[in-house]
Every structure is written in C-alpha cells, then in structure tokens.
Amino acid sequence: MVARTLGFIGLGAMGYPMALNLLKVLYAGARLHIYDVSRDVLRQMQETAPGLVDVCSSAREVTERSDVIFTIVPEGAHVRAVYLDAETGILSTAVDGKVLVDCSTIDTETSFAVLDAVREKSKTVAFYDAPVSGGSLGASAGTLTFMVGCAPNDHHFPLLKEFLSAMGSSIFPCGGFSLGLTAKLCNNYCSGLVAIATAEAMDIGIKSGMDPTLLARVFSTSTAQSSINDKWNPVPGVCPSAPSSNGYQGGFKIQLMTKDFRLAVEAAGRVGSSLHLGSPGLAVYQGASEDERCRDRDSRVVFRYLGGDEDWKQKVDEGNGR
C-alpha cells in the first residue's frame, strides 16, 4: 500500500492513547502530525514519543501536512470547529485526495453538516464517521471497536482498516455514512441501561447478605452475563482492574455517558423508535453527572448515585462470621 502521512487531532483521554498506538504503523522516517487545544498535552506527547510526532499549531496545519487525518473530540460543536472554522479548520485549506476520519461520538446532524461541507470543498476528498467503543482502557491496550460509516466494499476501507487496526481489534463497516454513529449510540444506550441494571441487581444481592464477587460469577455464567459485569463491574472490589475498584477513576466519564445516552434518546425520537427506558435512564445519568460525588468519575459510578453499598466487604465478612 502507498505510504501515507498521518495526522491526529484531539489528544484527550481517548485520543492520546489512540495516537500513541497509531505510531506503530508510521513508515520509516515519518512523523505523526498532531494538534490539540492543550499545549501541555502536546508537550507531553513530544516527551513520550520523541522524534515520532510533529506538533502543529492548528487543525489546518495538520491537514496541510497529512494525507489521512483522524479526529476525536468531545462534542458536535468541537467537531464543527475542527472541520469548519474558516481560518484554522480542516476545510480552510486544500483537501483534494485526502481521507478524513472522525472518531467522535456526536449527533448525526452535525456529521452530515460536515459531510456536506466536505463535498462542497472537494470532489476527491473522503470523509467517514468511525466512532469507537472500549473506553480509555481499550484505547491504551489497542483493543477498541471501531464502527465505520461505510459499506464493506468501500474502496477506502482496506486503508482505513490498516490504520484502525493499530488502535483497535474489531473494525466493523456499518453499511453507509452515519451508520457508524448509529451503531455507537445504540451500543451506548444498551450498555448504559445494562450498567444501571447491574448496579441495582448487585445491590439487591449485597443488601440481602450475598458476596457480590460470587454474585458476579453467577451472572457471568447465566443470562445476566455482560461485559459490564465481567470487566466493568460497578461494585468496588469485584473487578480489581475496573475503575470502580480505584475510586471510579479512569474509564468513561459519567458526563460523556450522559451525552451519548441523550444523543441516543434524541436519535430514537427522530426515527420514530419508542423508548420506554430512555427517560428514566437519562434521568439517572443526568443526576449522577451533576452529583459532586460522581462527577468526573467513571460512568459505572451510578452504583454510588443509586445508593449502592460500597462498604459491602466488612458486612459480608461479619455475616460469614469472620
């Protein structure tokens, strides 16, 4: 495959480790052209990967130096700024023949607005939605799932897969533009509800006197099995590597889950899908994101918000006569 110069815009909790993994597929002597609004993050990346990154002053400069550009920023407004700003945005410079890949989780209207602007700018530029799942742990491990808004036979998909495989272990072409975002919002709606249900079910067991580590093992071999239970259990001490066992630090911030859950509920309204759990689920995440005990922590902190017993171990030990 022809060597391509790569750019990466957005070095947050997800983007930073993703960019580090993308360094693995740079051709000899190449550098990854990077930009973020935080100068401290750019400096940190330079120190972490000396000689492998080229710090740029704007999204425009990244675009001028790169053939394939990846972006991942928090919200639709940020995506519009990165792509559409008249002076510093990606589309403020020539983009003929370039491949643009947005990994942000945003509303489909914004993504279509950017697509329209991209098509107006050039007939030879390609733009894809490719949101991710797996959280910061998956980003660091290079095991993310990518949901790409294209058909399996899209002529750019082999190129996309080559680069995305450096950052993830599962890459799904979802059928057409914006369907990557659709898949991501459906996934987060489902996983968000599963996290709430797991938190509540675990608390029933704990307050009935059951050891939650045992209950989690029961779930893992029964119909309540899920990645939330097995890898991201909301009860502290059940999964040693889960954020819940580290004060809910790391992982996927509650505010981001609230945003994604809201986007899913709004998407359902646009397409005429009736959600019976959407409003109560969103109320839980909105409440938790505004709660000082939960804000800026992993989204499985809903266990705390819902009144879950985090001091279960002493009580279980006492119940067992220890």
Image (spheres, rainbow, N blue to C red):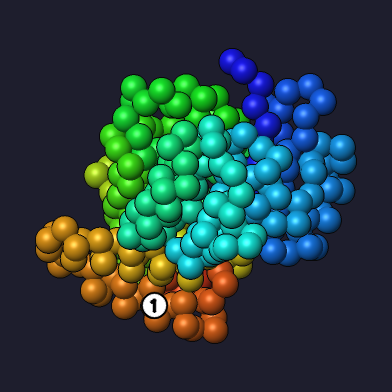
> Depth check: 113 or 53 in front?
113
Q: Position of residue 115 (x, y in %)?
A: 40, 49
Q: Which residue is tagged 1? A: 286
Up the image or down, 155 lies above or below 71; here it is above
- Residue drawn at 48 percent across, 67 percent down: 77
- Residue drawn at 56 percent across, 63 percent down: 85
> Depth check: 63 or 1 in front?
63
Q: Position of residue 244 (x, y in %)?
A: 54, 62
> Depth check: 317 or 276 in front?
276
Q: State which quarter of the image contains the N terminus.
A: top right
* Residue 131 in view (yes/no): no
Q: State which quarter of the image contains the C terminus.
A: bottom right
* Residue 78 in view (yes/no): yes
Q: Position of residue 268 (x, y in %)?
A: 20, 61
> Depth check: 216 or 71 in front?
71
Judge left or right: residue 56 versus residue 109.
right
User: Which amino acid type is shown beneath numbered disc 1?
Assistant: Gln
Judge left or right: residue 232 versus residue 31.
left
Up the image or down, 147 lies above or below 74; here it is above
Q: Which quadrant would residue 220 be assigned to in this image?
A: top left
- Residue drawn at 28 percent across, 34 percent down: 175
Outermost residue toward the top? 1
Q: Which quadrant would residue 247 be assigned to in this image?
A: bottom right
Up the image or down, 85 lies above or below 132; here it is below
Crowding around mark 1 (Cα neighbors within 10 Å: few <14, some 14 to 19, many 20+) is some
The secondary structure type at the circle numbered 1 is helix
- Residue drawn at 45 percent across, 63 percent down: 76
What number of labels is visible?
Answer: 1
Q: Position of residue 269 (x, y in %)?
A: 18, 65
